[in-house]
């Protein structure tokens, strides 16, 4: 178990959210988040143009829940992630929300650009970064880029790709214990047993603070899969169509208000 | 962790199988099972009349895979579970296979009848008992009687009902790590953290021997959820629509050839 390094208490929150987050009246997620971030925060939404419909109601919901100002950065090509107007919006935001259906669509527009570097720097300096749906998967260093779901975890179904790099401790996927994608997350941990796997249900969020404590908000559950004690896995030998075996995973299913220490890997 | 009690080495195999088990050429499950049970075993299929279509190809597949003789016991009402012809078939079988879509449909036809008592006695004396799909869930003392799947585990979604009572250590559900029902199994363990949860993928089986060692056969995986170390669960306080929280579950995803000791609760 990793020791708690001197935490960078000035780092901004990371807030992965499950897909289809509903309004404040239904989940209270954004209101709760804004209570932490401070009154009437300036919010920027980053979305690939192909996914822009996902952001359609989001502006209004954020304002209804207490956002002071919401701007949208739409990325159609990588050059849009170098545009001065986009960078200026992020420079003055209190919260940036990444919105995506397919994480790869967003990460290939962002990766290695000025916007990605600015998001990392501003998060390190205290700005919160959230992600909804596939946008949550993009937040950490490694992400699940593809892979079938609903079937047995098989080596060929699990594809890891580089994400935005805001944490190197997590692997985030949609769908917690209740979803049909937990197998995919287990398969990814067989490949990479150094990170915690986080599965987030719809209408549910994980608030990860500067102290590396995660708190659950919303109507569903967040599933944490800890591979610290993994005994045996066939990941090194399995072919693409082989099912994955992995033993001694520790699993926690956490609901609204539950807290988990990411440094010491234990529920609080 | 329970100590290994003097095992009853004469007890017959328990063989829960995932739904939609295909023929021998595709999975080898029955051929492998018959290699253990001995040449050309006499097989009886027990199925509720409403589910009889599930057994339609099963007779031919069992014969193709090496069964010596296959008879079918169709239950339309509880009186059919007292019929002397049905009891005589089971009295002389080497393997009985329970076949069901909804486990409750079969358990309500079997529970407390002469056929159920005979199945328990003959299994204790060495006869193998298998179950396919919902029929696998019926094998142990407790079973998942209903409950929605694909959604977050919530108290109201988990219904435990009495099964056939061939084991008091297991809770068996369809769908392992790859399925959308693992959350339901986790929810059931929050209610009953004394049993191991076993999730079985389609076209996959668990062979549970008289020595309480489980071996996986087939193309998918068997997921074992061990609640021995469960720390906190909200099961005692949660209302029907509340999501379930449960911490410190140990999870193993096992594939063809993997073995697990049910007494000592560890992979072998």
Image (cartoon, coloured by chain):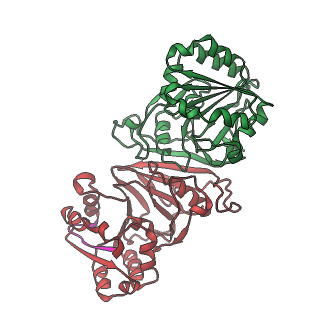
Chain colours: A red, B green
In the rendered image, which quarter is residue A52 located in? bottom left
> Who is closer to the viewer here, A26 or B112?
B112
The residue at the point 74 percent across, 31 percent down is: B67
Compared with A110, A264 (above or below) is: above
Whether residue B197 is situated above or below residue A232 in the rendered picture: above
Quadrant where the C terminus of chain B lies?
Answer: top right
Whether residue B185 appears in this view of the structure is: yes
Q: Position of residue B79 (x, y in %)?
A: 52, 13
What range is drawn magenta here?
A37-46
Note whether residue A48 is visible. no
The one of B88 and A213 positioned closer to us in this rendering: B88
Q: Position of residue A33 (x, y in %)?
A: 29, 61
Rendered view: B44 above or below A64: above
Residue B103 rendering spot, x and y as whole percentages? 51, 30
Q: Is residue A40 magenta?
A: yes
Point 25% across, 52% down: residue: A26
């Amino acid at each position: 178990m990793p020791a708690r390094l001197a935490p960078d208490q000035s780092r901004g929150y990371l807030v992965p959210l499950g897909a289809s987050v509903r309004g404040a009246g239904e989940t209270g997620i954004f209101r709760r988040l804004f209570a932490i971030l401070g009154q009437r925060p300036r919010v920027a939404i980053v979305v690939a143009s192909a996914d822009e419909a996902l952001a359609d109601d989001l502006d209004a919901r954020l304002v209804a829940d207490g956002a002071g100002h919401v701007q949208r950065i739409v990325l159609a090509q990588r050059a849009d992630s170098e545009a001065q107007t986009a960078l200026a919006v992020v420079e003055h935001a209190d919260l940036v929300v990444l919105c995506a259906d397919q994480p790869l669509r967003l990460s290939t527009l962002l990766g290695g650009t000025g916007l990605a570097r600015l998001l990392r720097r501003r998060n390190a300096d205290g700005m919160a970064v959230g992600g909804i749906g596939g946008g949550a998967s993009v937040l950490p260093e490694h992400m699940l880029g593809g892979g079938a779901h609903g079937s047995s975890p098989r080596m060929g179904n699990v594809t890891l790709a580089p994400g935005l790099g805001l944490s190197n401790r997590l692997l985030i996927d949609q769908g917690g214990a209740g979803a049909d994608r937990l197998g995919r997350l287990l398969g990814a941990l067989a490949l990479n047993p150094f990170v915690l796997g986080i599965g987030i249900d719809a209408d549910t969020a994980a608030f990860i603070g500067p102290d590396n404590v995660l708190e659950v908000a919303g109507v569903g559950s967040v599933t944490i899969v800890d591979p610290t004690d993994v005994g045996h896995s066939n990941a090194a030998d399995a072919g693409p169509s082989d099912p994955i075996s992995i033993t001694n995973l520790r699993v926690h299913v956490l609901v609204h208000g539950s807290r988990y220490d990411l440094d010491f890997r234990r529920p609080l």
